[in-house]
Amino acid sequence: MLFKSDSIKEPLGNSIIQMNKHISTNVLVTVLITVLSGCASLQFADIFQGYTSQMKPVKAAQRQGEFVKAQSILGQRSASNGSYVLSLLERARLQFLASDFQASQKNFAQAYVLIEQQRNKAKIQISKGIEKLGAVVSNDNAISYQVPYYEQGMLHSYQALNYLFQHDFEGALVEIRRANLVQENALKAYQDEIYKAESELANSGMSSGSLDGTYPSMAESIGEVKNGFQNAFTFYLSGILYEASGELNDAYIDYKRAIEIYPENHYLQQDVLRLATKLGMQDDLDEFEQRFGSYQSEKSESEGQVVILFEQDIVNSKQDVGLNLPIGRSNRGLKFFSFSLPVYRGALPQHSNLTVSNAGESYESNELVRIQSLAAKDLQDQLPSLLTRQVVRVVAKEQMRQKLSREAGDVGNILASIYNIASERADTRSWSTLPDEVDIVRMNVPTGKQLLQVQVHGQMQNIEVNVQPNRITLINFSAIGNYTGYQSINL
Amino acid sequence: MNKLALITTLGLTLTLAVGCANKSVVRYGDATAVETTDINFGSTDLQKVAAEMTDSLLLSPVVGTLTQNKRPVMFVERLKNKTSEHIDTESITDSISTKLLRSGKFRFVDMGRVEAAREQLKFQHEGGMVDPNKALQFGRQIGAQYMLYGNLSSIVKSNQDKSDVYYKFTLRLMDLESGLVEWADETEIRKTKVKESVGW
């Protein structure tokens, strides 16, 4: 790596070198530039421009329903870039919305391979060390993106839909099993990781309490979710697919997991009651009837079921927030440093429900997952480890500034200060093309060709479905900004 | 400074020289060699499953009586993939049916090629190219007496230090007329992977 130092291309590096001849400063700057550019894990734009602002035009195009244009704005990242996995996820989601299921499946599969590779890597990674060195002199965007559990769950859920819409039922079930594995692993890792991150933070001279009062509270974004990975959408999708393949016991377990997260969801209540009756789970049935009211089966031979998964809007992006926080150094007492950290600002936006009517009866959608809440909760859990890295970074940058100011005078001081301010960017990376909220509607519909009238945001849209007796027809309906569209399939 | 330049040049030359010597190479390998590239379902698992299942089927006393004086006709339904991997289960059933055919004790009908056969017969009768007296007749195919079907399921566990995957493969032979399952067997495979402690 150090051999590359004679081919510095960045103008900042050149100008600094010309201004002073001291070798140690030279070495410092060279190391800095090589670490930043040599590894190519970072695009130059990532150092000085956050992910949120890079994604803004993409999301604008997505809101217009111009998914192909959004993909071209998204651009290509090289496979060595630290955000490559993330760019695959964004692209695959846009391709899914554009109904290009084959391409979407390919990109999700590639992302999965990379996530698995990451998971199976050695416990101590040398390349990680170099990345972290890069992050110390620039910002967290230099660290390769770790796909959070809730995003991995969504990856497999959309991949399952990709397989379904290509009529590969068995492939869809494989993805569902993977999604369940992700949630199990998340549950196991969760407590460990939080404990470890908090003790590391304490060693660095801060506690997570030091954020209270300065860091904006995300309580409103988080809402009522208990953890950042349990996703009722994934459980529900899994339940529908198992039910459609006749594995009612598996379906029942998934519906029960979903209802633990969303007990007030009317359709989930009906599902657990129906399956508990069918499977003869008398104890469960008594308990559920006490909670949700009694149930009488309304099954008729000439009816089928329609399930609508209703995706609303786009999840918010993380914002950059600047803070002044004291850091306790063992020999020099407290000193204030300026930090930047990612945050989700503001309350959860309220979405209007979707109303579906058919043959005089109308049904309102119920919330199944709030991805915004999962994302905010996940960020909150990550804060201790983010802060630890931030402390190391501000201290290192301050030492670099002092060194440059000693050896290159005012010019060095000013250049270092400008660099420190310009490069101090929070890591705002997250899967930004996901929906904000997913709702469900489940209804019994007479068999044959049926016209469903969907009312969303004051607009009417007709969906024509061909319902088969005792089968489930699955519809994935998206309403993003001005765009509405759907895909349907008979399971 | 001169010394530094010299060392840098030397280092660069060395890296380039090593880099040039490190060419990509194509080799032939043993198709039945044990493959342990990663923990996922691989060629060794496929070969093990297919070999054990056919051996068990051919050696079982029940099948011995079935095939004593005749060669029963079978068809392979499919293997249900209940694992968390996208596995080409047709490839496993292909291996099994090929081995069974090779043993000479069974005959097979291939449900996957019914349409192609129908096309050909249709062409012989309606295409106008084939002598109608020599065209093959419809409705003369022999129906299967036995059905082969099965499941492939897995349990996957992992923690920071290792991953463990367990595969269970079940195969059954059903008499289509009576509905009786005449034979069944299962094969298990366990693989564990311990993570290396230091790596790139």
Image: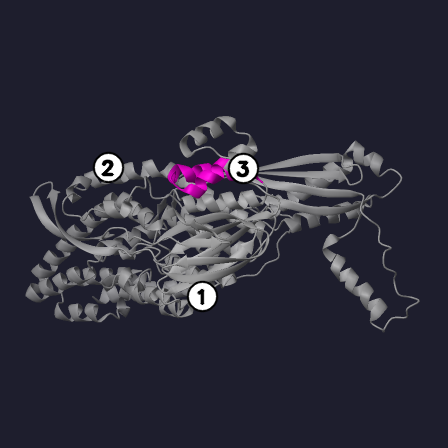
Q: Residues within 10 Å of mark 2 (few under 14, many from 20)?
A: some
Q: Is residue A9 above or below residue B99?
A: below
Q: Is residue A148 visible?
A: yes
Task: Report helix, strand or loop for mark 1.
Answer: helix
Using the numbered discs, state the Cα–Cα distance from disc 2 to disc 3 in whole angstroms. 53 Å
Which numbered dot is residue B5? none
* Color style of the picture: one colour
Task: Determine which quarter of the picture holds residue A401.
Answer: bottom left
Left or right: where A389 falls relative to B141: left
Look at discs 1 and 3 and give the one toward the viewer: 3
Amino acid type of the residue that numbered disc 1 sits on in the rendered structure: Cys
Which numbered dot is residue A199? 2
> Which contiguous range is marked in magenta?
A247-273
Q: Position of residue B198 (x, y in %)?
A: 38, 44
Which callout, 2 or 3, points at the residue further toward the start of the chain?
2
The residue under label 1 is B20
**Chain of the residue displaying label 3:** A
Q: Is residue B198 above or below residue A404?
A: above
Which numbered dot is residue A297? 3
Amino acid type of the residue that numbered disc 2 sits on in the rendered structure: Ser
Task: Determine which quarter of the picture holds residue B70.
Answer: top right
Look at discs 2 and 3 and give the one toward the viewer: 3
Task: Report helix, strand or loop for mark 3.
Answer: loop
Task: Report helix, strand or loop for mark 2.
Answer: helix
